[in-house]
Amino acid sequence: MAQPVNTQIIENGTVIDGLGSPPKRADVVIAGERILSVGDAPPPEVAAKMERVDANGLTVMPGLIDAHCHISFDEPSSNDELFHHRREGLAAIIAAVNARKLLCAGVTGFLDADSLFEIGVDLRDAIEAGIVPGPRMATGGNALLTAAGGTAGRLIPDEGLIGYGKVVRSAGEITAEVRRQIKRGVDWIKVHVTGLTPRQKRAGEAQAWRRNELELVVDVAHSLDTPVVGHCRGADSIKDAAEAGFDLILHATYMDEAALGAVVEAAVPIVPTFTFQANLADYGDQVAAGPEIRAIFQKEIESSCAMLRRAYEAGVPLLCGTESGFSLTPYGDWHYRELEVFVRDLGLSPLQAIQAATSEAARAIGRHGETGAVAPGRLADLILVDGDPAQDVRVLGDRQRIKRVLIGGREQALQWPAPNRSDPPGWRVSTYGSRILRRSLIKTP
């Protein structure tokens, strides 16, 4: 016998729909896991039979979707710590705890494009099965690297696995690794198209893949219905990734006219991921970062905003991602921050930034058009916020203002996990800062 569908009504709230429309007073009716209607209240005799939630004085909006989050890293301060001081079982346990922190910050979905030990696949499945609480999750496996790729320089081996990456050396190895990851159950294939080399002669990073190699990754992945995402910092890499058929580009900094044209032609979504750079530039003094490295990261933002804004105005979707998972971007603290950067540095309105963090960011978890909006038929992945993000997106950074989080219409527990947590032996080692940049360290208005 079929179970009756649970119905509820969120009454008296101000709705931000995540699609760019102006806020409005409206009631949201939910049937099961989806939104049934947004507008006037149903007749009293109907409403009386529903579970009722009073949202008077609150904003009802889609939950945030973080399109670039490393849930398995656990806030390292160096590549040495990340690559050589993590253990598979412990990393999986800690990642499950950290996923709860995202919920408490109003995050209802995220993309982890590459994960240590490929534990993202298992965490995603555990969340979907209701074994551990967490947002909706999409995941990659090991990022595909060449020996010259990645951002860890000489720590990258000439072959094999390191941290979150797999070095591939030939067309045969590329094909085999893409197929292996898809067999394992990844949602995305990630390619580190660029990397740091000791004597590179260009802004950003050096392109570490040839165009035909990128096309091969796309061909193999797409033949098995799996999208491809690329880490690209540099004009040539952005152009080649867009023309090779990549489905998502991370960073896309230092674009030139040719790269911009390719991105616009392909309409490939971009996740600029400026939160890491902005935190270091604005708050690096809190973790003893030197002025030289802070200036470098500030310059990356300043050098890239004009081109990214032009891409946006030409119809390229921009998605909010924060690179949460490093010591500069700890879990639960900074998932709102990319919206702030979009408003401050890219010149988007708060509603446009919210759209980039909700309905547009749903592309990163494979649910564009299905979640990320307060609209009939969408999944009821919602947050109730004490404040008006349409006036100031920074209110989303205060966990105390996140009053309720719903995923598929089900309310999530918002108890902050492990407030007095310590680190396992050997988990933390070398640092590029003196401590983790918790938001509580920062004096914010």
Image (tube, helix red, strand yellow):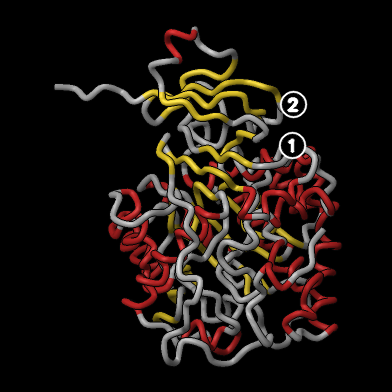
Where residue 126 sits: x, y (%)? 30, 56
- Position of the C terminus by quadrant: bottom right
Where residue 207 sits: x, y (%)? 65, 70
Identity of the residue drawn at 77% across and 58% down:
255
Identity of the residue drawn at 42% across and 83% down:
86
- Position of the N terminus by quadrant: top left
Disc 2 on helix, strand or loop?
Answer: loop
Q: What amino acid type should be assigned to the residue bearing mark 1?
A: Leu
Q: What amino acid type should be assigned to the residue bearing mark 2?
A: Pro
Say whether residue 245 is visible: no
Where residue 144 sits: x, y (%)? 47, 69
Residue occupied by mark 1: 351
Residue occupied by mark 2: 22
Tell me, yes or no, whether the two marked residues, 2 and 1, touch with CB atoms within 8 Å.
Answer: yes
Q: Earlier in the sequence, mark 2 or mark 1?
A: 2
Disc 1 on helix, strand or loop?
Answer: helix
